[in-house]
Image (tube, helix red, strand yellow):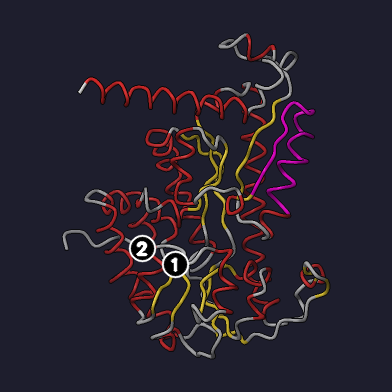
Amino acid sequence: MVGLLDVAGAARRAVGSLCSLVLACSLGIVGGGLSPAVAQAPTPASPANSAPMRLQVVGGLAGVSQYTRLEQPFWTRRLPEVTGGRLTADISPFDRSGIRGQEALRLLRLGVTPFSTALLGLVAAEEPELSALELPGVSPDMATLRRVVATNRPWLETMLRERHETELLAVYVYPAQVFFCARPFQSLLDLRGRRIRTSAAAQSEWVSAIGAVPVVIPFADIVPSLRAGVVECAITGTLSGWQIGLNEVTSHVHAMALTWGVSLFGANRAAWAALPEDLREVLRRELAELEQRIWDASDAETGLGLACNTGQPDCPAEQMIGPTGTRARGRMTLVRVTHEDDALRRRLVREVILPRWADRCGPNCAEDWNERSGEQLGVAVPVGR
């Protein structure tokens, strides 16, 4: 027994040392000696004597507009500019950083990734309550989604701080996620029997409920999977679908927003506390502005993605430039939302999505959700079933 305890203690000390080293490296305080500000810890650093710090940041999905036009320029250009060079950052997209999206919260908690994005659809496997913010069909438009996030934000901040040692700094959203299919269809019920790419448990439940077959596939593998016939349809963002070339392997796209791809951006609390207070204030202010720009862009890009995929004139010239040159105009068919589709959405949310989420989440989730959002938004979970 003593031997086992000794091994466990040694393992904990080793993990602690590793995490401390990773945290120090991420803040740019090892390698060339400690900066004066760090050497004087725990006394907070003043703006005059703090040495430059370099953050290691895990961002969102690679190759899509949110990352290339907003996240990457923010960390590599905007941040050094507003801090006078005192704070710089290296950012890599999470799907090219060598980490599993499902482990984002655990890695934040350990400090292995001190500043990181966590996609709700992936981390909900560890924290099912989070998936309530983007359950399929609950937020059919951006206005509803804004209300869902706003009513849950105080709980979200507290939960991340207490359970995951994470300081919530921003909530991001990708353009609406819709159905892309390689064969024609006129309504959602036509998708029965088809194999459909999903990215989360709740999406898979929705797909199963309409009689289709869900296949969980990473974002980076969507196009290869469609080309190989692994799936016949895919659920993903309207603009990200265009940017990865889904119009070249599918023919029809549905107009209904199933989900929106909500993600969190947070900091390990120790990494956050290690920053001088004035830099924390700058980061909070600037990240709040970045969050607003991302939401506004997501709203606009939802329509833009549909326009580009279907070859409409309002698809801007910049979207017609691909990695290998000028792209061919989209020729996809837009499948509009029918009354039957909307009725199906409402029924599935009420009878399938919310009850199964409550079962998966635990005994108190339904009551807590109803109190925070469900009752006032008209999407309460049936209790006492």
337 in the magenta segment: no
72 in the magenta segment: yes
Label 2 or label 1, whichever lies nearer to me, is: 1
How many marks the image carries: the answer is 2
How far across and down, in percent of the image, does residue 137 sit? 42, 69
Single out the residue that lies furthest toward the front: 3
List the residue tagged with mark 2. Answer: 378
Question: Which is more N-terminal, label 1 or label 2?
Answer: 1
Single out the residue that lies furthest toward the left: 384
Q: In this view, does 92 lie to the left or right of 113?
A: right
Element type where label 1 sits in the image: strand
Q: In this view, does 134 lie to the left or right of 175?
A: left
Q: In this view, does 280 lie to the left or right of 342?
A: right
Vertical relation: 206 (above or below) 83: below
- Mark 2 and mark 1 in contact? Answer it, CB < 8 Å: no
List the residue tagged with mark 1. Answer: 216
Vertical relation: 294 (above or below) 245: above
> Which stretch did the figure color magenta?
69-92
Q: Which amino acid does the dot numbered 2 rest on?
A: Gly
